[in-house]
Amino acid sequence: MKNSIRKVGNQGMVTTTTGNDLIHDLVLVAGVPNVRTAVIRKIMTSNNTGANATLIFGTLDRQAIPVFVPLLPTLNLLNGFDAEWIEAEIPSVEFMSDMTALAAGRNGSIYVVGSVAGILVSIEVEEYGA
Amino acid sequence: MSDISGIYDNGPISPVCKIKENICAWTELKWQPFRVEFTEGIPRSRPFVVDMVQLAGAGNIPANGAINQQLLAILRPAAKELLHLRFEPLDDVEGLLWEQSAMTRFNPKGARARVSMFSSAMDPYLASTTFFVMGGLGDKDMNLEVRNPNAIALPMARFAFWGVRYVLDTLPSVPANAVYLPAEGRQN
């Protein structure tokens, strides 16, 4: 019996660009929106960019030009090191699609923003729903 | 008094009757009586796992896309045989059952249910996925359609099947003590 599915973020290993980088797209079912939510359970990073860096996980709002909404605290990455966070170290923020219009609404998919380009990021998510 | 067996009761799959007991299967637009002459289990195992992407000859199942219903040759019983099966996906896809290529199952008026990796959340033994395939009826076999709820294409869409096989002998009339089974699911 399972209440959830654990899987790698469905965009695979993402290389940051300093913009909003999609790392997990929330599941959609045609005609039945918002059937799943997702919680980040593990994060693995590698920073070989030549400088210390930061990462923020969040989602986008529903403005005409979507703006990043941070949902987890900033993570600090030392140059030349990998860094991992496991389930006990990550707040159980549930990413969910919020149909509220415009700025108050959120699309729910998981995005990551790096302070520099070239950071490698993989996540594991736990999806709930149907 | 005839009984409908507890085929959808929540629990591990088990035979609907014993050898030499009678069943009555709804198929070809009528209740047809049979005596069970032999029965055996079909364990969930590798030969009864099918990758629908491979079966369809596709490279993948597209993001938020589908593979139209495909006939599952591994589930075609011989004449006078009945398969009693349950199923679940091994990948994050959804299965829609068809019996014959155009008759939908799990299909009340409002919407059509799909079997997903979440189906076992409320139904740990997947009793609600139970279906039957009657052999020897030409194209009246099991077909499976697959939907991908993910925003990415998936290279595999595997489904596992398990259950019970019955070998049947036809009876001239419906006996009083038959177990009734919705073998074909046809409603009229």
Image (cartoon, coloured by chain):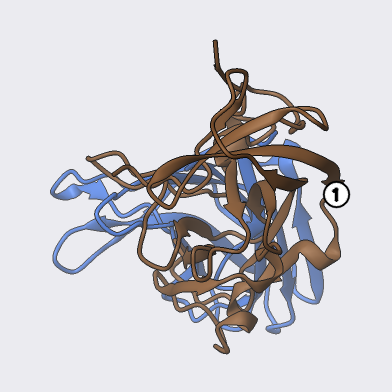
Chain colours: A blue, B brown
Q: Quadrant of residue B46?
A: bottom right
Where is B127 relative to A104, above or below? Answer: above
Q: How many marks?
A: 1
Is A89 or B113 nearer to us in this picture? B113
- On the question of residue B14 being in view, the answer is yes
- On the question of residue A92 being in view, the answer is no
Where is B111 relative to B97, above or below? Answer: above
The crowding category of the residue bearing disc 1, from other C-alpha atoms within 10 Å (few below 14, some 14 to 19, many at least 20), is few
- Can you identify the residue that label 1 sits on? B43
In the displayed structure, does residue B73 sit left or right of residue A88?
Answer: left
In the displayed structure, does residue A26 sit left or right of residue A117?
Answer: left
Counting from the top left corner in percent of width and height, residue A91 is at 60, 37
Which of the chains bears the disc numbered 1? B
Residue at 55% over, 77% down: A16
Where is B85 relative to A17, above or below? Answer: above
Is A122 or B28 nearer to us in this picture? B28
**In the orientation shown, which residue stands out farthest toward the front?**
B172
In the displayed structure, does residue A121 sit left or right of residue B4?
Answer: right
Counting from the top left corner in percent of width and height, residue A104 is at 20, 44
Residue at 36% over, 58% down: B103
Counting from the top left corner in percent of width and height, residue A49 is at 68, 83
Where is A38 relative to B152, above or below? Answer: above
Residue at 72% over, 46% down: B168
Q: Quadrant of residue B13?
A: top right
Q: Which quadrant of the figure contains the N terminus of chain B?
A: top right
Q: Amino acid at mark 1?
A: Pro
**In the orientation shown, which residue stands out farthest toward the top?**
B1
Counting from the top left corner in percent of width and height, residue B2 is at 55, 16
In the displayed structure, does residue B78 sit left or right of residue B5?
Answer: right
Label 1 residue SS? loop
Q: Which quadrant of the figure contains the C terminus of chain B?
A: top left
Residue at 50% over, 38% down: B182
